[in-house]
Amino acid sequence: MDANEEKHLREEESRQEPEKEALELGPEEVRIETSGPETEEVRTETSGPETEEVRTETSRLETEEARIETSGMETEEAQKAGPKQNKKGLWKGVVFFFLCFTLSFVLGALLCYFYFFGFPKRQENQAIHNGAASSSTLSDSNLENLESINLPRVTEKLRKIQDLLTDSYLYQENGKDAEEMIYKGFLTSLLQEDPYAAYYTKEEIEETRNRQKGIYKGIGAAVSEKEGGPLVEYVYPGSPAEKAGLLAGDVVLKVDGISVESLSLNYIVENLIQGLAGSSLEMVVNRNGEEVTLRITRGEVVIPGSEVGDVAEMLKLQSGAEKQNESAPQKSEEQQPDVNRDVLAKLKPGDIGYLSLRGFYMEAVDSFISQYESDIDGKKKALIIDLRGNPGGDVEAATKLLDYFLPDHLQKPKRKDSQPLQTQENSPETSNAQATGTEGSNTQYGGERASASVLEVTPNPNRQFEKDKTLLLYTEDKWGKGKDWYAKDGHEVDLPIIILMNQNSASASELFAGTMQDYDRAWVFGTQSYGKGIVQTVRSFPDGSAVEFTTHYYFTPAGRNIHKKGITPDLTVEMPEADQFTYLRDRTKDLQLRKAAESLYINFIHDKNSP
């Protein structure tokens, strides 16, 4: 081989060396280190289909291998850790449940504590701020001293007292009596603010309910509190008191030798006068300045729930009684001008009916309605309802009677001040009665001025009522919540009505008269009523005992609360002092009944009786 050929071969090898080197390098290295056409050539060759397949296949195999390896490891680890994780999950669930239970218990205990010991005071303060609380105000110092009873402290002290008695008391305890007295003492602590609060044993609550129905063991006389001793206001016909000679107007001085002048009326009635049927008592009374001694045998007394009559016959206007009455005191003669005597002389039997109601309990109201339907409805032109001396009773009974008298679809009346009643006979020449002031005056108890500290009790202004229904009354508690009653029986009484009231007409009787007054369905004659505008609730226990305490104010449909004020009559008619205790036995001396009859006759009956 000559020199030229060797030189040619060396050049050829040197030219192929970069290509071989390039084939051994990756595409990125080629891209960096080479340039120009050779670089493009090498890149094209390196990135061909075979290279891509190799790279893809390699990547896929590596991924599959890694996945299989990882999956295998996870499976193995999960198999090893499975029991441990199950145990951890179970314990976590138990701990979570225990924490939830503990938290719920703690929160429940806190809520109970604040409800019984914290919230009521705040709610009472809010009620006072809203004007729905009691009308009597308390000073800041008194409010600081008020708190709910501390039951744990009381229980601990009672336990200590019991331990002392067990160790040292000489006599035998009566556990049942001790319990009853504890309960009575608890409710007695409320009497300063709530004179109607009481605890009743099973026997006492049954006796109380019987008295409300007009059935009790006693002598059969109605008495009221008076300086010097209880005043006998009424003796029921056929009662033990009537048989023994007790008269209305007598003042009780002694019972079985015990002076009653300084004792409370409730104590005298419950502990000295009432008793077992067949037992007797000795009573000393003051009758017209003389002491009279009576022996009265107790018995079961049934007080008629209602009484019906005809006013013309009761006043004896058609029986010549007017001539007999000429011997009456000159004072009464002066109070009855001749013009009125002539008016009543024209009143005939059948013109004006009379119904009295002794108390608002269901049996009495049912009797009242029955007597109205049998003796008044369709037979009389007007009606006088006598609620004098009616102490009240059951709210449900009162609303039942209101429902019977009022239609079902009256608009809620607006509150208005009452004005002197303008009737044809209401003038100095024809009547001795004086018109009252405004409805909002603080007059109570038959004309005595109430204390200036008695504040107006206003209803909740946000209270909503049903439209196009006759509202009968509504109640509100210290939070401004309560119940409302509506007429729904589809019945009404369409007669001119006058309601008679006096200082002993209270509670449900005031509610009835006030509602009839609000709807202009009746006039009220007589004197200022008692002024009890609160409602008591009786709560019974499984053993038959019960507690009673004040829970609500009540309001007439026009929003009036008459607590400590009473119902102001449309026409005030004072009973002459000489006749205050005899009019129930002798109706010819009943001036209030007479004035009501005059008004009804002149305003509603005169034209009908004219030829």
Image (tube, rainbow, N blue to C red):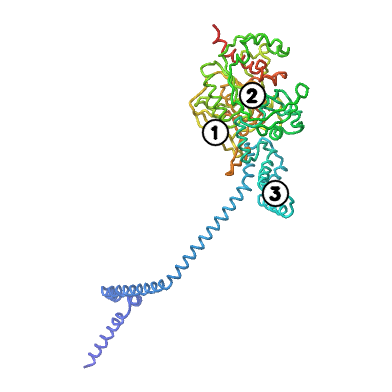
The image shows residue 398 at horizontal and vertical percentages of 57, 29
Q: Amino acid at mark 3?
A: Glu
Q: Earlier in the sequence, mark 3 or mark 2?
A: 3
Do labels 1 and 2 touch, CB within 8 Å?
Answer: no
> Mark 1 or mark 2, which is nearer to you?
2
The total number of labels drawn is 3
Q: Amino acid at mark 2?
A: Gly
Q: Amino acid at mark 1?
A: Asp
Vertical position of residue 3 compared to residue 474: above or below? below
- Spatial CA distance of label 3 from label 1 is 48 Å
Query: In the orientation shown, which residue stands out farthest toward the left?
Result: 1
Q: Is residue 234 visible?
A: no
What residue do we see at 74% from left, 33% from top?
A: 263
The image shows residue 604 at horizontal and vertical percentages of 56, 14
Vertical position of residue 298 compared to residue 48: above or below? above
Q: Mark 1, residues whose alpha carbon is within 10 Å: few (<14), some, or many (≥20)?
A: some
Residue 303 vs residue 9, the one in the foreground: 303
Q: Quadrant of residue 261?
A: top right
The image shows residue 272 at horizontal and vertical percentages of 71, 33
Query: In the orientation shown, which residue stands out farthest toward the front?
Result: 278
Q: Which mark is residue 484?
A: 1
Do labels 3 and 2 touch, CB within 8 Å?
Answer: no
Q: Mark 3, residues whose alpha carbon is within 10 Å: few (<14), some, or many (≥20)?
A: few
Q: Secondary structure at mark 2?
A: loop
The image shows residue 102 at horizontal and vertical percentages of 55, 58
Q: Secondary structure at mark 1?
A: strand
